[in-house]
Amino acid sequence: MTTMRYQSTREPFGQGQGTVLPVALRRGLAPDGGLYVPRTIPPLTVAPFMAAARAPERLSTTATEVLAPYLSADLPMDEVSRLLEESLDFPVPVTDLDDHTKVLELFHGPTLAFKDVGARVLARLFAATSKPGEDLTILTATSGDTGGAVADAFHGVAGTRVVVLYPKGQVSDRQELQFAGLGGNIHAFAVEGTFDDCQRMVKEALSRTDLRADGNAGLQLTSANSISLGRLLPQVTYYVHAFRQLPTEQRDRVVFVVPSGNFGDLTAGLLAKFSGLPVRRFVAAVNANDVVPEYLASGVFTPRPSVRTLANAMDVGNPSNLERIRYLYREDIAALRRDVIASSHSDEEIRGAIRQVYDRTGRILDPHTAVGWLAWQAYRRQDPDAVGVLLSTAHPAKFHDTIEPILGLEIPVPEALQRALLRPNLSQPMSPTVEALFAVLEDYGK
Ligand SMILES: *Cc1c(COP(=O)(O)O)cnc(C)c1O
């Protein structure tokens, strides 16, 4: 097996300098400001066409096969399979919505969102690749969902500590308790400012290269945001997992429908396709933040400030993973247009979709999955024999504020969330300056 290396999107395709996984994980961004990508895309060594009846039910089994070429240069395979079993210990079922629509339920992890998949594997990859005595501090700014997934994933992981910054009073009570109630190695700070302040503080702290984990520094700062390679790679695996669960006669017309914000999830799907998974097409579903559909239509990418919508984990006006997608396609927009169809949907449509799907099927979609369903309806008109696999990215109970008034019912709270709601809120206030953040970090360095 060739040794996998990771290079920057700003280097020529497949010809970059390349670095090993532990370094790419700790750096987050490449030194030239690009994003890390695998220098070569390994062909799938798994058999995607095995009979559905024999397909492994557990995501961790397929994940071990899919990720072997990515991880085995830096980690022994028995350790890879153990860490994936530990990380991916929840069900990821594929269920039927109607005759031509399957739902890939990615929300059965501890924080009820698909981000658990990437964050939990990332946490264990940090631990598995750590040097003796390493003491990593992971900085994360959150507007809600990411903080919960990252904090929960790293809770109790040796040699790591997480600092979550979030805008005071601007995340829901349920979201706040998912990260602020954990304690131990998880430290939550309610910043007296906006999400942008939180992001700026994290960026400024990480720009101090003398404090970063890839240097020899005392503090060893790193991040776990959605550009992290360690979150991207695990997401490739559920596309293969879902494909294997489909009946053989449907496998020549599979369309994955991906609710998208920062476009990490879609990038992972495209990696699966480049590895040989025979996907007919991807439908990228976005809310009112429509810079990517606009890019596909016009060929010009114009980032904009994000606007708030009901599907708020997808409120992104400058999706960073588009850089990875353009790299993978080597700027060949015609090829990208053949593989990816995108559409944008308003809050009013989202409300209508939640209502309609519930009335027709009895299933409650969260607002993000509802955007996916809308894009799928739009796409199907031009490709009526397609079989859609709709990625369901969050459990509706996380967004009860939005859904309950639309449907006039109460959504039962799953056990994982019930437990989180019983915890005390341990967060502390912080003023919106990088000095305030450093004052806290210096204490950890001692
Ligand atoms: C983060 C998130 C998305 C968007 O995923 P990207 O990889 O950023 O495109 C969609 N739905 C939910 C619930 C999310 O938390």
Image (tube, rainbow, N blue to C red):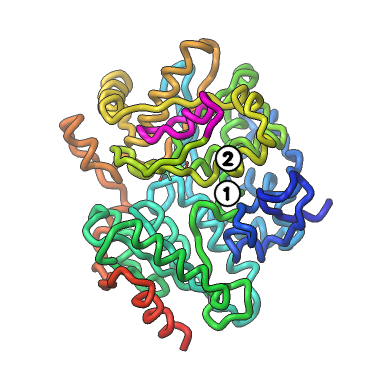
Cα separation, mark 2 vs mark 1, equals 8 Å
Q: Nearer the viewer, residue 244 or 426?
A: 426
For residue 232, the mark is 1
Q: Residue 329 falls in which quadrant of the image? A: top right
**Is residue 32 magenta-colored?**
no
Q: Residue 142 falls in which quadrant of the image? A: bottom left
Q: Position of residue 402 (x, y in %)?
A: 23, 38
Q: Position of residue 75 (x, y in %)?
A: 71, 62
Residue 309 makes an appearance in the image: yes
Contact (Cβ within 8 Å) of mark 2 with mark 1:
yes
Outermost residue toward the right in this view: 1
Residue occupying image coordinates x 32% and y 35%: 367
Q: Position of residue 304 (x, y in %)?
A: 41, 41
Determine whether the beta carbon of the residue marked 1 sits less than 8 angstroms from the nearest atom of ligand 1. Answer: no
Q: Which residues are magenta?
A: 282-300
Determine whether the beta carbon of the residue marked 2 sits less than 8 angstroms from the nearest atom of ligand 1. Answer: yes
Q: Is residue 361 above or below residue 54?
A: above
Which residue is identified by label 2? 267
Q: Is residue 395 above or below residue 2?
A: above
**Helix, strand or loop status at disc 2:** helix
**Helix, strand or loop status at disc 1:** helix
Residue type beneath disc 1: Leu
